[in-house]
Image: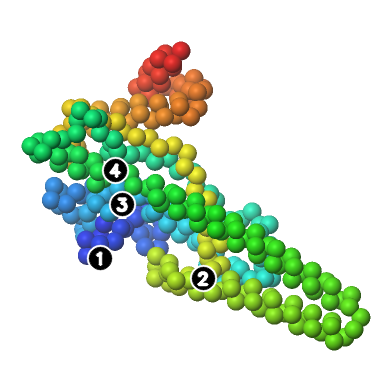
Amino acid sequence: MLLVSVDIENAETATFDSYDTKQYHEGISLNHVIASVAVPKNFAYEEINGQKYWDGGIMSNTPLRELLSQHTIFWKEKLRLDSEKERLTYATWKNWRENEQKIPNVKVCIVNLHPSKEAGSHIPSLDDYDMTKDRENDIRFHDKTEYDLKMGKVVDDYKDFVEQMTDIAIESIDKINGLSTKVNEKEYRDNLKEYYEQRISAVNKVLNHITRTTMRSGNERRYWHLLKHRFAVDEMLKIQREDDSDTISDKIFDFSYDTIDQLIKKGVDDALYKVFEVDKEIEKFVADIREQNTKEDQYLIEAANNIINKNQ
């Protein structure tokens, strides 16, 4: 579980991880939860280890970047990908390409809590301050990950392209080395050997080249990091909250029990409708939930059955 807040002092997002990390050793506590919902002006900031935090939504309300960053950090530490032993070179390239021990891909489900679309009859007039403020909040806080997802996939394409081109280059270098042993004339054999060593040096130089961007920690990043620290991002589901005709501008600050309960049930309905669009076999889902037979699952079962009945 990840919770995102904004460090007031340096205007950067801070990601609190339920796993024990180098930066936050205690995992997630109630203080981190409060920090992640401390909306400026409506609630006081939360202080943790001398740092003051506000709700992460003012910078990253759908924190996809933070998720991907923490995913990278977790697996880099677990697989020790930053160690000198893991550096990509000509000698280690083939083993890395064939090795299954890589950062696993991520399948992302995104829930947009603020309606992207407003019903035509519900567009605020110039004289309606409350509805104008409400729509401003929806636009300010709604999901903005579309471009991030697109750029992530573009980078994945470049990564695949670089890997395939490097495979071709290394295969060609190996071929040169193999042919050099079959050349009878010493001058040509020595020339091929020298060229072979130059190409290996060139490959290693490219892989170890320092990039324009740094890591989030501020440490320098090299080209081989772009390959070894990369993983594919697959967008599985995007659940969109629908516009509410009875909305008010400060609905996002209502944490009363009845409102939270109503929002949870609406979220279940929206999620199940999206799941049904993707996978029509929702009866199996109902059967699995019914086996657990917990009180908390009763609404989930009822909502799923309603979807099934409407689509029969």
Q: CA distance from mark 2 to mark 1?
A: 26 Å
When asked about the image quadrant of residue 258, the answer is top left
Answer with the quarter of the image where residue 293 lies.
top left
Q: Residue 222 bears which disc, if any?
A: 2
Distance in Å between CA atoms under marks 1 and 3: 15 Å
Assess disc 4: are there few (<14), some (14-19) or many (≥20) residues with their C-alpha within 10 Å of its C-alpha. many
Number of residues whose C-alpha sits closer than 10 Å to that of mark 1, classed few (under 14), some (14–19) or many (20 or more): few
The picture places residue 298, in percent across and down from the top left corner, at 36, 21
Q: Give the alpha-carbon distance from disc 2 to disc 4, as whole Å.
A: 34 Å
Marks 2/1 in contact by CB < 8 Å: the verdict is no
Measuring from the top left, give residue 134's x and y in whole percent: 17, 39
Q: In the image shown, does 28 or 272 lie closer to the viewer?
A: 272
What amino acid type is highlighted by mark number 2? Arg
Residue furthest out toward the right:
184
Q: Nearer the viewer, mark 3 or mark 4?
A: 4
Residue at horizontal 29 percent and vertical 43 percent from the top:
142
Q: Is residue 288 among the parts visible in the rendering?
A: no
When the figure is inspected, residue 20 is found, relative to residue 204, above or below; the finding is above
Badge 3 amino acid: Ser
Classify residue 177 as left or right of residue 277: right
- Mark closer to the observer (2, 1): 2
Cα distance in 3D space between marks 3 and 4: 10 Å
Q: Which residue is mark 3?
A: 60
Residue designated by label 4: 142
Vertical placement of residue 190 versus 29, above or below: below
Of helix, strand and loop, which one carries label 3? Answer: helix
Relative height, residue 168 to residue 179 (above, below): above
Name the one closer to the observer, 124 or 179.
124
Q: The residue under label 1 is which amino acid type? A: Asn
Image x and y of residue 264, in percent: 30, 31
